[in-house]
Image: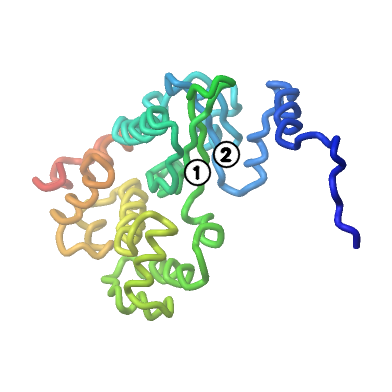
């Protein structure tokens, strides 16, 4: 078959692409293509960190019926302060450096309103003079990301094992054997795929499960800690506070207040839960 050769007077394809994109109407929401990808959330913000674009997965996860309802809002209007501050720090880094920030492992809310772990990529947005005027990003849940983000089947096997045994004491050597890798190889592949070690991934699964358990009626912090394999409530509180920015008791109390329920009694928290 004869190979196609562009004629000497053919368009410069880069210039043609530029003219094509410039001719698109601003009302053409190209980012809606992410709605065809399960659980992918797209957003774009201006230099004042206000949301100016959001696909359906993003605004519905935030509880807004349409994109117009969320436009102009910032993270501090949508998330608890401890989450919003982390998002803002990453946004400022992208705006100030003009460089993408990839594989950000962060808490977000799933469709049930429970904090879930997501992998987010953020990119600067530039105007016609190459000035950074905002940023855009896309996030996907670990749950949906296994086959997409895991570099090979070995890591996929390790993830499946962690999800099944995250309430137990997981030995790294056993996990590596499950993945048919050496411990060093397993660690390297996890960091490449998720920006965290297998132990870090395990901790995120436990904190996610803790958030869900603490939301249940009558949940006791000490029982949640024991069910998730912590040796005592104090250790659980330390780990939870490190990842969530609040103690289990404060998290549980805020959730119940938001739901119009009574706050958990003081005796359920003990001294270490405040």
Element type where label 1 sits in the image? strand
Are the residues flagged by discs 1 and 2 in contact, CB closer than 8 Å? no
Q: Nearer the viewer, residue 230 or 51?
A: 51
Q: Nearer the viewer, residue 168 or 48?
A: 48
Q: Is residue 28 above or below residue 188?
A: above
The residue shown at (63%, 47%) is 37
Q: Residue 98 in the image: x percent, y percent?
A: 44, 31
- Locate the C terminus by quadrant: top left
Q: Nearer the viewer, residue 204 or 274?
A: 204
Mark 2 crowd level (few <14, some 14–19, many ≥20, 10 Å Cα): many
Q: Is residue 204 visible?
A: yes
Q: Is residue 87 left or right of residue 45?
A: left
Of the image marks 1 and 2, the number of the one nearer the N terminus: 2
Q: Is residue 115 left or right of residue 136?
A: left
The residue shown at (66%, 35%) is 32
Q: CA distance from mark 1 to mark 2?
A: 10 Å
Q: Is residue 178 left or right of residue 246?
A: right
From the image, tell me which residue sits under label 2. Answer: 57
- Circle number at residue 37: none
Mark 1 crowd level (few <14, some 14–19, many ≥20, 10 Å Cα): many
- Locate the N terminus by quadrant: bottom right
Q: Is residue 79 visible?
A: no
Residue furthest to the left: 271
- Circle number at residue 139: 1
């Amino acid at each position: 078959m004869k190979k196609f050769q562009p004629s000497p007077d053919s368009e410069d394809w880069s210039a043609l692409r530029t003219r094509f994109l410039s001719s698109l109407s601003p009302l053409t929401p190209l980012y809606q293509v992410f709605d065809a990808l399960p659980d992918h959330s797209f957003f774009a913000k201006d230099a004042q960190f206000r949301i100016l674009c959001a696909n359906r997965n993003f605004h519905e996860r935030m509880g807004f019926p349409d994109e117009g309802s969320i436009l102009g809002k910032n993270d501090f209007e949508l998330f608890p302060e401890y989450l919003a501050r982390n998002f803002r720090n990453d946004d400022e880094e992208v705006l100030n450096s003009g460089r993408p920030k990839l594989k950000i492992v962060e808490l977000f809310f799933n469709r049930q309103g429970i904090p879930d772990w997501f992998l987010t990529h953020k990119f600067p947005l530039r105007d016609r003079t190459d000035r950074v005027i905002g940023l855009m990003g896309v996030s996907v849940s670990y749950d949906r990301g296994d086959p997409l983000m895991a570099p090979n089947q070995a890591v996929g096997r390790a993830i499946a094992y962690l999800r099944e045994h995250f309430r137990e004491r997981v030995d790294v050597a056993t996990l590596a054997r499950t993945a048919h890798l050496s411990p060093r190889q397993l660690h390297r592949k996890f960091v490449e795929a998720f920006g965290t070690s297998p132990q870090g991934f395990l901790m995120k699964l436990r904190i996610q499960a803790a958030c869900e358990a603490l939301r249940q009626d009558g949940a006791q912090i000490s029982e949640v800690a024991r069910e998730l394999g912590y040796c005592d409530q104090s250790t659980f509180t330390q780990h939870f506070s490190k990842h969530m920015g609040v103690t289990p008791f404060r998290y549980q109390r805020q959730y119940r207040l938001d739901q119009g329920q009574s706050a958990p009694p003081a005796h359920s928290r003990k001294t270490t839960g405040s």
